[in-house]
């Protein structure tokens, strides 16, 4: 996916819709969402092989593996699949080409559906079914309010005043019944 921009994103996964504000700049991504009155910000930094989640109300942050499915659906992988151009359209004031996309990823899983892409690779709409081995996942993504241009570097950094949580190994003995080597009754 190309281009630096910010936009409103409506992402529906298996019928559950989430509205986000997304910022992309040189491969970095920031996703802001509010649910149940609480804000969550996800920052993806592929340039550092890092990701983290921010909770603005508590000024807390937590690291997250960029490969964790909770990080975000990696739609950039769609560009690895076979695509057939179906025609030109306009979405959100942007000229797009609609593609039929079908294929299996080298890493496993696949996608079948349609992608509406600008000439510089911004996906204005994605509709289809992904399969990552855990069964089919129906996806629809729509971008609106697209504003092209570089985004501030500070959007992709941990803000000052936030405490980074560490969920590393716990230095406590594991109860015998929970250990893999525990004797079976």
Image: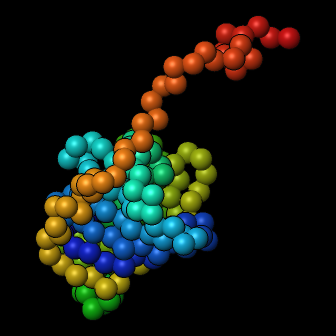
Q: Position of residue 40 (x, y in %)?
A: 44, 62
User: Viewer-proximal residue, 172 or 119?
Assistant: 172
Placement of 132 over or under 127, stated as above or below: above
What residue sits 74% from the left and 17% below the top?
177
Placement of 12 over or under 137, stated as above or below: below
User: Viewer-proximal residue, 18 or 128?
Assistant: 18
What residue sits 86% from the left and 11% below the top?
185
Q: Position of residue 70 (x, y in %)?
A: 48, 51
Residue 133 figure quarter = top right
- Left or right of residue 36, residue 120 in this image: left
Q: Residue furthest left?
A: 150
Q: Position of residue 25 (x, y in %)?
A: 19, 64
Q: Position of residue 88 (x, y in %)?
A: 29, 86
Placement of 24 over or under 9, stated as above or below: above
What residue sits 47% from the left and 75% below the top?
19
Residue 100 figure quarter = bottom left
Could one spot residue 174 in this view of the protein? yes
Instruction: Please identify the quadrant where the N terminus is shown.
Output: bottom left
- Left or right of residue 93, residue 171 in this image: right
């Amino acid at each position: 996916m190309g281009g630096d921009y910010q936009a409103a994103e409506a992402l529906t996964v298996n019928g559950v819709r989430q509205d986000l504000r997304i910022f992309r700049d040189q491969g970095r991504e920031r996703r802001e969402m509010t649910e149940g009155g609480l804000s969550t910000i996800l920052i993806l930094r592929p340039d550092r092989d890092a990701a983290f989640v921010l909770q603005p109300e508590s000024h807390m942050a937590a690291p997250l593996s960029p490969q964790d499915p909770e990080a975000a659906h990696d739609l950039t992988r769609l560009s690895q699949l076979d695509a057939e151009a179906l025609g030109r359209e306009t979405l959100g004031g942007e000229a797009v080409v609609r593609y039929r996309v079908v294929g299996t990823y080298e890493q496993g899983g696949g996608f079948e559906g349609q992608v509406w892409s600008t000439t510089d690779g911004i996906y204005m709409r994605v509709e289809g079914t992904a399969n990552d081995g855990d069964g089919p996942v129906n996806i629809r993504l729509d971008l609106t309010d697209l504003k092209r241009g570089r985004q501030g570097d500070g959007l992709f950094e941990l803000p000052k005043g936030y405490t980074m949580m560490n969920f590393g190994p716990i230095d406590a003995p594991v109860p015998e019944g929970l250990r893999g080597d525990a004797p079976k009754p």
